[in-house]
Amino acid sequence: MLDALRRGAGTWIAKIFIALLVLSFAVWGISGVFTNFGQNVAAQVGDTDISLIEFERAYRTDLNNFGRSLGRPLTASEGAQIGIPQQSLARLVAQAAMNDKSTDLKLGLSDDVLANQIQTDPNLQRQGGGFDRALLTNVLRNNGMSESEYVTERRDLAERQQLAQGVVGDLAAPTAYAEVFNRFQDERRDLSYLLINAETIGSIEDPTDDALQAFFEENKEQFKAPEYREVVLLEVSPEKLMRPADISDAQVSDEYERIKDRFTIPEKRQIQQMSFPNKEEAEAAAAKLTDGTSFADLMEERSLTASDVDLGLMAKTDILDKTIAEAAFAPEATGTTGVVEGRFANVILNIQDIQAASTQPLSEVSDEIRQNLAKEQAEGESLDLMTEIEDARAGGATLEEIADRFSVELERPAPFDISGEDETGAAVDLPNADGLVTGVFDSDVGIENDLLELSDRGFLWYEVTNVIPSRDRELSETRDKVVEAWKTDELQARIETLAVETAEKARSGSSLLKLSREIGTTVETLSGVKRSDTPAAVGSQAISQAFNGPANTVFETLAATAPARVVMRINSVSNPAFFAEAQQVQELSAQLSQQLQDSLLSQYVSNVEDEAGVTVNSAAVSQAIGLMTSAGQ
């Protein structure tokens, strides 16, 4: 078909779907479930069907694109959680609505125009210019589209573009609109402020007994003892079962010979490499070296620095080009070599230093080998023992009985809370098993729990033996923490009180300089601050308030780091000059114009959808996502 259309070419499939209609479609309201339609239909807009194949293709593309942006593939379930199926279907519905309206309005374009658009698409041009059919074939194959489907998509896209152009045209943001936004972005303010923090307040004295008791009673829930649980643990792992003493010297020696390469440091050479654009230049340079020119002089002659030629200290296997590797590590390769014809360039090498290969002797690594052999042996034993323990549990044996039967140590850690901490707040030493603590607190006394896998190929069984319920603590049990909490609250209250009082004095006419001397701090200033600035000391909240009033406004608010606060005065307000022809304003106007066009087109598409009517085959869509999941998505 493309041959009939002047051997045209296509653009990237993703661009077909979103080139024009990547708009901020809000949460769109399509409802209903098909009742008398084929299961191969995902949705219907007016009289236009959206096939499941179209939906699957769009969804798969969106899922893969989102995964690439995250740096890892996404599963279908993860895609569903963030709404990718809904977004894909919403886009297809919008496109179908636009296609329907284009047909009603009898929009279209000739084969000649379509062919020209296809063959001049910049995405499929070969180097040097001209359409590259191989690129088109690759795109179609990767996206599961036929050539005829592609041409149909391009024609539909062109018609949608005509319709969109008719709706929004060259709609431009009014100059006054751009001026308001420009003022908002570039307005600047000069500020002065006092920072009131813990240093300003000074040390907080210990509370009286009455004050402490009252604070404790008001905040008793904060100091409540959490629920603790006692457990027994049965761990079977290579670390627990390994017996290095059972490994003979002969086994260690045999293993050493088998893996000797692991303990061998290969020969390394300090290599410089000078590349040439062609063999003739390389040979001319080699002749100069033969006549007595040094490698360093040749570098200077060619305006090369050490970083241009140094490859570093390399082993033979570190060099990707085998020809260059052989030349660099030839027995006779010392000093400069002749011309080496590499895969990508002609080079001359300069060998500066050679470090001979070396191997660690058995005496230095025997302990490591013995431990590894013992661990490998224990891995098999732990799997066998796991099976036997599971059989015993199935027969009703308790962990205590199993530990006695198989001579495995039963562990009884200190009682711990949901955070894994004991009653002193220290972390309890527990096996590294995901879900252990949460599993313990989801279980109860006398309940048999599923085994957990350990990170070292081991297994863990646990049983809850006692539940220590949460309770109110007495003040004497947690006095130090209560005192600390009281001081924290008191510091915050004093900072806030001082900040409010200081701000009120400033509003009444006192200068910040005078007030700074009274409270023992200094006046700081900020010049030319914009809304988008976030000075380290005052933070974003203060800057936001600094743009909420006119010059000479005084306010107090939280500083960047709680509980510190700032008392701030707006010294002056500077509005930016507006020049419609300035580059910054031109860029802003273009952005605002695009937003207006997108908003208008979005409303138009929504209205078209409402007029046409949209229904969705929810069961078929869910099945399609499930099929893609089972296929390994």
Image (cartoon, grey):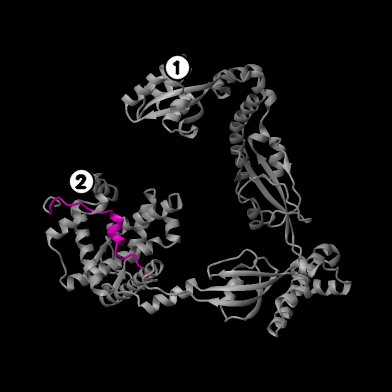
| Of the two numbered discs 2 and 1 in the rendering, the one whose residue sits closer to the viewer | 1
**Residue 192 sits in which quadrant?**
bottom right
x then y, percent, for residue 395: 62, 44
Q: Amino acid at mark 2?
A: Arg
Q: Is residue 236 above or below residue 79?
A: above
Q: Is residue 593 above or below residue 445?
A: below
Left-right relation of 462 to 281:
right
Q: Residue furthest right?
A: 209
| Callout 2: SS | helix
Q: Amino acid at mark 1?
A: Ala
**Residue 44 sits in which quadrant?**
bottom left
Q: Residues within 10 Å of mark 2 (few under 14, many from 20)?
A: some
Q: Which sits earlier in the primary sequence, circle 2 or circle 1?
A: 2
Q: Is residue 130 above or below residue 551?
A: above
Q: Is residue 617 above or below residue 577?
A: above
Give whichever of 601, 570 is nearer the camera. Answer: 570
x then y, percent, for residue 139: 27, 49
Label annotation for residue 133? 2
Magenta residues (range): 5-25
Residue shown at 63% from the left, 34% from the top: 238
Residue that numbered label 1 is attached to = 330
